[in-house]
Image: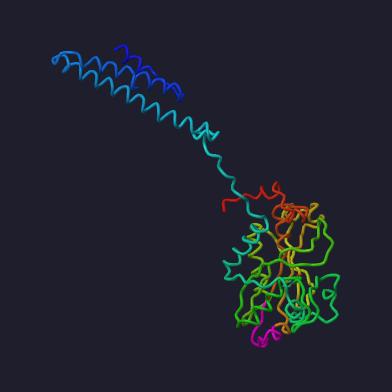
Amino acid sequence: TQYTAEINAFSTDSADELEQFRIRFLGTKGIIKDIFDEFKAVSPEEKRVLGKVLNEFKQLAEAKYQTLKDQTEVTETKKDLGLDLTLPGEGFEIGARHPLALVRREIVEIFNKLGFIVAEGPEIEDDWHNFSALNFPEEHPARDMQDTFFIKKGGEKGDIALRTHTSSVQVRMMEEGKPPFRAIMPGRVYRNEAISARAHCFFHQVEGLYVDENVSFADLKQTLFYFVQELYGEGTKVRFRPSYFPFTEPSAEMDISCTICKGAGCQLCKQSGWVEILGCGMVDPNVLENCGIDSKKYSGFAFGMGIERVANLKFEIKDLRLFSENDARFLKQYKTSL
Ligand code: PHE
């Protein structure tokens, strides 16, 4: 009984101490061996009673040893690895989507609801798709090295350059398919400009094209009006100012009532209450014909907007360079659930 109490009280997380315990009780010269040796000498009647007690004692010692052995093994492994396996995991940080990707997706979703599909084209374009088919005259300044990054002279469809706008995707779409067309075309475009807070040598646009029988300027206005209400909230006003693009006639620039001051006048809109967000117009019949579409039967509208500009207005970002610097402090602010 003295030993039983000792065994019950014994505890250790040291492998050495446990080994001492094993030798003392369970070893070949241990206490249990001794007792069993003495046991041989007692009378048969006593053996029956004592035998049961002794066996229980032996089992107690063995069970204790096994439990402690399992425990110390875990402790020893932890020591070896130099880590505590019971600590909670570290968890990993969820990344953020790029603000331009968020805005692009929002634009795409709004136009999807109106039945516009998404189309894409190459960033390296030939002169035909970027300029000629779009009715740019031969001497147009955009065809100048000053504004466009040219890659190669000549070629079947003219010089090869980085596309300066997504309008080239309109041409590809109309050449390859049959009307009606109803698509938006997001993508990266390049212009040879000095990098500053307000200009960059690349940026992103979303082009829109709708060609069918009897498409009118009213359709253009209604589509863009709906888009703006969805993107900037109900009550956002729009206005159209006459403009010029070689590939649309008539052409317009669309302003919206300033998203910050709601038209009252602030720094962003330079006290005018309006900010420009896109260019648009009715597809020039020459463009339709260049793409093999009967301009007597079909008409259409097109528009193009800069995603950076839309994002600037949404998030009040004042420096364009932030979009491409990959500064995590900037990017982390745009955490979303998706
Ligand atoms: N491509 C024009 C630009 O880059 C925008 C635009 C697209 C204008 C379609 C009218 C129609 O400025």
Residue 75 percent across, percent down from the top left:
47, 30
Instruction: Check the image and report above or below for 76 versus 150.
Output: above
Which residue is situated farthest in the left direction here? 45
Q: What x and y, as percent, mark residue 128?
A: 75, 81
Report ligand 1 position as a quadrant.
bottom right
Give the camera-side residue of 290 and 163.
163
**Quarter location, residue 48:** top left
| 131 w.r.t. 39: above or below | below
Quadrant in the picture for the N terminus: top left
Residue sitting at x 61%, y 82%: 177
Q: Which residues are magenta?
A: 288-300
Residue 251 place in picture, x, y as percent: 76, 74
Q: Which of 106 and 251 lies nearest the eye of the viewer?
A: 106
Q: Nearer the viewer, residue 70 or 37?
A: 37
Closer to us: 52 or 287? 52
| Rendered residue at 29%/19% (across/down) | 33
